[in-house]
Each structure stands twice: as C-alpha cells, then as structure tokens.
Amino acid sequence: MATVPESMKAFACANVHGSADVALEEITINVPTLLPRDILVKVEAVGMNPVDTKVRAQGTSGDETKPVPDEKKPRILGWDGVGEVAACGAEASSFKVGDRVYFAGDLTRNGSNSEYIAIDERIVGRAPASLGAEAAAVPLVMLTAWEGIFERLNITPFAAENAGKSILVLPGAGGVGSFAVQLAKKLGGLTVIGTASRPESEQAVKDLGADHVINHREPLRPQLEACLGSTGPGCVDYIYNAFDTAANFEQYCDIIKPFGKIVTIVETKENLNMSKLQGKAVTFVWELMFTRAMFKVEMEKQGAILNNASTLIDSGLLKMPSVKVRPYTLEDLKEAHKEQESGKVIGKLVLSSKARRR
C-alpha cells in the first residue's frame, strides 16, 4: 500500500473566477476522501482543454471577476490527467495500487490540477504503455471524438456500408479534430475532409490521414465540390463540428446530404433554425463527454473506450497529434491557459511534474 499524505498542493480558483493571472492560485488542502467506486491517483501530468479556460473564466472578460460560490470553494480545474493509482475505494476493483492510468474526469467534481485526484474507476483507463506525459493529452479529446463518431453519428467501425461516404471535420488540427480525423478514416473507412486555416495546421491534418484539407475561413461548398466532385443537393454525409456551432450552421444546412448527420461539441447562445434541416431529414446531435459522469449513466463505457484507445495507440494505428509539454508549475499553468485561449493551438498542451523549464 502506497503512503498517502493527509494534505496536498493544488492549483485552483480559490476565491474568484476571471483571468488566469487573477483567478489561479496555489493552495494546500486535504487529500480527497474516496467514494466506494473511486480510486486515488497521484497525478504525473495534466492536459489542457478549452473547458479549463471556460470554467476558470465563467463568462468574465478583461479585469472582471466573479466570486467562486462557497459550496464550490476551492474550484480545482483540470480534467485530463495521467498518473499512478495510490489507493482504492472499498468497492473499486478495476485497478490496483501502482497501476498507471489516464482519465478525463468529471465536471461535477474537483479536477486534476492537484497532486492527487479522486475519480470513479469506471471512467478511467489503462494508460498507453508507449506514452509518457503525453498520455495526459488523450482522454478528453479521444472520448469526445470516439463518442461523436461512433455513438452520436452512429458510424459502425470497419463496416462495408461506409464505403463511399464522407465526413467533414472542422477544424481538423485541434485536439478533438486530430482524433476525429483518424477515427473516421482508420476505423470508419470514410473519405475525410479536414479543415485548417494555416499552412502548419494544414500539414498537421494531412499527416493525420485526411484525404483532403480545405480552409474553414473560405466558403465550404466550392472547396468541397472541387475535392469531392459533388454538385448535388449536398456534399458530405457527416459533419463533425468542433468550432462555434452557429458560425457555419447556414453552410452546414447547404453542404450536408439528404439523410446526413451533424454532431457538434460547442455550445451556442444563438437560436439556430433547425427547420432548415427538415427538408433533407438531417440528424443534428450534441456530444458532451462529461454527460455519462454527470448523470451516472453507462460510465463504464468510457473506461472501455480509453482501454481500446490505449491498444490502438500502442499498436501504432492511432497517431498522437502535436503535444507541447510544459513544467507543472503555477506560472506555466497560467501561460497554458492563455495559449489555449488564443485559439492557435495545434494539437494539445500538457503540463508534467517531470518536465524541466528550458
């Protein structure tokens, strides 16, 4: 049995939500108490995602701040993580102390920006043996891409019925897009069109296996018709949207084929005219990988997905996107938040306790 201290350090919104410089603080708190199905993980590295910056900011901008509600103090951010099991809850049986695991966490609980995290074993997977700190870049985006492709769009892996069908992934070089492109191509067998707006991101999408790369800052239909030779009532069978849902909705209504399917992962405050999809009988569906943990529904499916992903990564079938690793310090965490908010990240950002500042 590993020795677990009573207290730990964590990076959190201890008092206010707001900018990274104002909101994030280093604190010392008690190591979390385990629920029956929990495991306690000693965190080695954490991944950065847009959700981290959104929860930190809580809609504030500039110098604005919002107090953290008393019942949520301190709000420890971070959901992606990789580390070693340090203890197991009374009913936990999937892992043992010393196992190396990775996870995307639970939006309703404190996150991974801490020395230890308590997490339900059902949403945890065996970490890829071939990866070090980079493993922390995988879980949230992998689960989001996997659930979106195979569950929300109902694409069956390795099915003959997928031959000749196409999917647009927008954008293709981000964290989710990087795996959505690969899953759709390598497991789904689809013709994949990824989007990019810069030369370096265009090359990244090509390297991940996309059949075509188009610019999402230009009108979509002419580019799709040019690369697919399609001039009918629609160009693509599926759309995976990982950008502002409202930004391209009108174009999606135009380029989706009759009976096509659209999945989106980004919230919107706009009122979208869903009736525009009625004529083509198009399916529009949301994906949120936190849903299972939030509502305690089919949680074990996420553990299974992460284990399958580990096998695919270790076999070399799935490639890692670009991963930038920083030291796991408060200052580096603040800088990672700012970089994530810039909208220019290709691949993923990771902070590792084993990394050293260059």
Image (tube, rainbow, N blue to C red):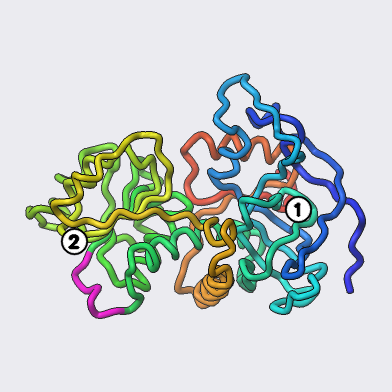
Q: Is residue 15 left or right of residue 176?
A: right
Q: Which residues are magenta?
A: 159-165
Please give the name of the residue rendered at 50% of the width and 34% of the height, measured from the top-left corner: 342
* Image quadrant in which the C terminus is located: top right
Q: Position of residue 4 (x, y in %)?
A: 89, 62
In the displayed structure, does residue 255 sit left or right of residue 203? left
Location of residue 196 by image quarter: top left
Residue type highlighted by circle 2: Phe
- Is residue 112 visible to the viewer in this orientation of the structure? yes
- Residue farthest to the top? 63
Residue 2 is marked as: none
Residue at figure coordinates x 15%, y 54% from the top left = 280
- Vertical side of 88 occupied by 176: above or below: above
The residue under label 1 is 353
Q: Which mark is residue 259?
A: 2
Measuring 38% from the left and 68% from the top, which residue is drawn there? 150
Q: Exactly how many numbered labels are in the figure?
A: 2
Give the Cα distance between marks 2 and 1: 48 Å
Label 1 neighbourhood size at 10 Å, few (<14), some (14-19), many (20+)?
some
Extreme left residue here? 232
Q: The residue under label 1 is which amino acid type? A: Ser
Quadrant for the N terminus, please: bottom right
Labels 2 & 1 near each other (Cβ < 8 A)? no
Q: Residue 53's image quarter?
A: top right
Q: Residue at x 65, y 24 (%)?
A: 65
Up/down of 185 relative to 238, above or below: below
